Image (cartoon, grey):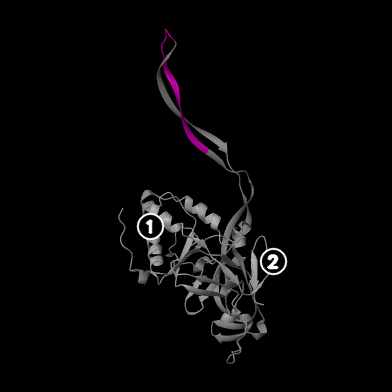
Amino acid sequence: MKLPRPPRIATVLLFALGLSGCVTQPLGSGQHEKEQAEYAQMLYVIGEALKADMAVVLVADLTPHKSLADAEGMSKWTSNVIWTHEAKPEIAFNRKFQNNELQRDPKTTYLFKAFEVHILPPGKYLLTGGDDYQLNATLDAFGKKPAATGKARGARGTASLTPETYREYYLEMNWKEGTTHTQTRTQKYCTTIHRASGNCVAWGEQQYDETTPGMGAGYYQDTDSRDIPALKVQVRLPPKQALASFTLQGGQLVLSQRSHLKTPSYRYRQGNCRKVAADKVDCPLEGFTVHTLAPPMDFTRNYLATRATLNAEQQALLSRLVPMQVTVLGRQGPADPVWGTPISLP
């Protein structure tokens, strides 16, 4: 199939293509062909970006740990860690996957349903913040005290709080009655027997119902959801307080380090917070921690090896993938077997 040529690379580079976090469903042949064409198009865009001396960062859609992959675990962490270009701070690299389903973009595009694609200019990037949540909270608790000029922001950074509705998933035990499965079957029976030989010479068919036990009666675990009030906590650090850094070279294809926030990742004193807008409160930051895990190179190599439709050129492109090299600038703590290595404000 000949694919349509994508937009000019200068236009394509304006977009960071993120991951929706959806579960793959069985596809019909038409949908399968459509997705294969989209993946081929994305690989073409990646290749053109590298030729244009840009860098491409892939981010694997993985939870910090398998124990955090259920409904309750999802509310214990967020992944939207923010890195800014040191020379051009208006350029940011951050995860697009949102734990809050109500904030996900249904039109998000990504590679193989497993990787975000970020096309970035080369240079040094600083870890300068992240977006976390404070669940079951509103701005009412902060009163209406306005901020004096410069008093709401701190030298170590600022936590900006804005209201948001959060879709929280939870596990519950529900009683379910026992079930049975009934299936109609067909059996043949003899209608005419040859008198001399005793052999059946004509057959008929009859149907009967066969019932088998299904799920036994008892309590079963279900997942449900509810929409709750929450505060989105946007932590931003000045460059001199950056927790870590990495450098991208032009033409480099990089697999990102895994970075996430263990909720709550922030610390502020409520009495120092000030209302700066009708729906925004700023608080001087007292503490902030990001947990990190090494780039998942083995997972990625094994996953890419399952892509049977990749041609030789596409395989050669993806073989250029290298792990991100991160330099720790903040205070590094001991590694945790679930959360990874914490990096905090000193």
Q: At which x and y percent is residue 281?
A: 58, 83
Q: At which x and y percent is residue 200?
A: 42, 15
| Residue of label 1 | 40
Q: Residue at x 67, y 85 (%)?
A: 271
Magenta stretch contains residue 195: yes
Q: Is residue 44 above or below residue 214?
A: below
Q: Main secondary structure of the magenta part?
A: strand
Comparing 268 with 16, the one in front is 16
Three-letter amino acid code of the residue under disc 2: Pro
* Residue stretch in magenta: 182-197
Circle 2 Cα neighbour tier, 10 Å, few/some/many (<14 / 14–19 / ≥20): few
Comparing 194 with 145, the one in front is 145
Three-letter amino acid code of the residue under disc 1: Ala
- Callout 2: helix, strand or loop? loop
Q: Is residue 207 above or below residue 257?
A: above
Q: At which x and y percent is residue 98?
A: 52, 67
